[in-house]
Amino acid sequence: MKEFTITGKDDGRRLDKWMLAEMPLLSPGMCQKYLRLKRVRINGKVAARDARLATGDVLNIYLNDELFEKPHRTDALLSKFHWHLNIVYEDENILLVDKRPGIMVHGDASEKLNTLVTHVRAYLYQKGEYDSMVEGSFAPAPCNRIDRFTGGIVIFAKNAAALREMDIRIRNHEVAKHYMCSIIGQMRTAHGTLENYVLKQEGRRKVIVSDRPLPGAQRAQTRYETLAITQGLSLMDCELLTGRTHQIRAQFAHAGHPLLGDGQYGDPAEGQRFGREYQALYAYRLVFNFSDETQTLGYLNGRSFAVRDVPFVHEYFNV
């Protein structure tokens, strides 16, 4: 038996219509049958089929519990999508994914389906941690993004609280982002900091790097260390001290040492010489250096996460 109290939105509604709307597994024929069998009472009295409901009425319905269940709708895309993820770390709040070069985080006009967001949501949907069919359900969302042809760790939040907190911590520079890249040539010093200004140009995909401040330009800082040198290439470990568009790519190109394979900021012929079609750049490591541990994600403070391998390191360097 189930008991219901009628609210204002159903005031004046006919009983059988209400039953069919509230009990989707109940057929019209079954509804009439159970009314004839006196299985429904309004305010303690047997209800007629054409009874009209009023605000405050108490319904007692004497039927099997399974008839009250709501049929579960499935997401046709996420339930069938063949996701593929390299998971670096996962808990109840966040998911760290190693994005391979070539896949976009978000879709655009050229590709709307095969994106990292779709893979993550399909994974969590099939795992039972996310249901796109539930109204108001939080859709797992990336907290950071990297370019399509850059590989590396993308942070996904599983709930709104984690998304808000991680966004604030990233903006407050409490998440250290480490990249590996291969550059053409060799820096004058084995380690140091690239410091200049980056200006985004409206309508253009490239940024301008200047050693002096420009109107609208933002300061850019990248700390670097040389790990290996071979075949006219240098393997660099970089830490972003600021997070500007194309920062590492543009700054090394400005220094005279563009990234291997970066046809946008360097010479495409150099990439072709090594058989590389896109930039050798990988966001391989994250370190959480939180200012406090009192919030939802505080347990991550001091922890470091890295990908298992960076493909171009094995391809070009014997390390």
Image (cartoon, rainbow, N blue to C red):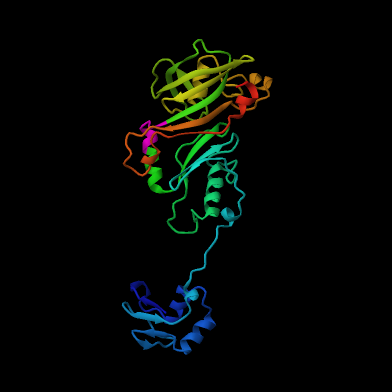
Q: Per the image, is 169 magenta?
A: yes
In the image, taking residue 17 as reference, residue 263 lies left or right, namely right
In the image, taking residue 95 as reference, residue 229 lies left or right, namely right
Whether residue 245 is visible, yes or no, is: no
Q: Residue furthest top?
A: 188
Q: Position of residue 132 (x, y in %)?
A: 50, 55
Tell how many labels: 0
In the image, taking residue 294 as reference, residue 318 lies left or right, namely right
Q: Per the image, is 294 magenta?
A: no
Tell me the quarter of the picture where residue 164 sits: top left
Q: Residue at x 49, y 36 (%)?
A: 145
Q: Position of residue 293 (x, y in %)?
A: 33, 39
Q: Residue at x 46, y 37 (%)?
A: 144
Q: Position of residue 222 (x, y in %)?
A: 45, 21
Q: Position of residue 95 (x, y in %)?
A: 48, 43
Does residue 254 sit above or below 100 in this rendering? above
Q: Residue at x 53, y 46 (%)?
A: 120
Seen from the viewer's position, the closer of residues 299 and 295 is 299
Range of residues picked out in magenta: 168-175
User: Which of the image's four quarters has the N terminus?
Assistant: bottom left
Whether residue 4 is visible, yes or no, is: yes
Q: Residue at x 44, y 17 (%)?
A: 193
User: Which of the image's four quarters has the C terminus?
Assistant: top right
Does residue 68 sit above or below 154 in this rendering? below
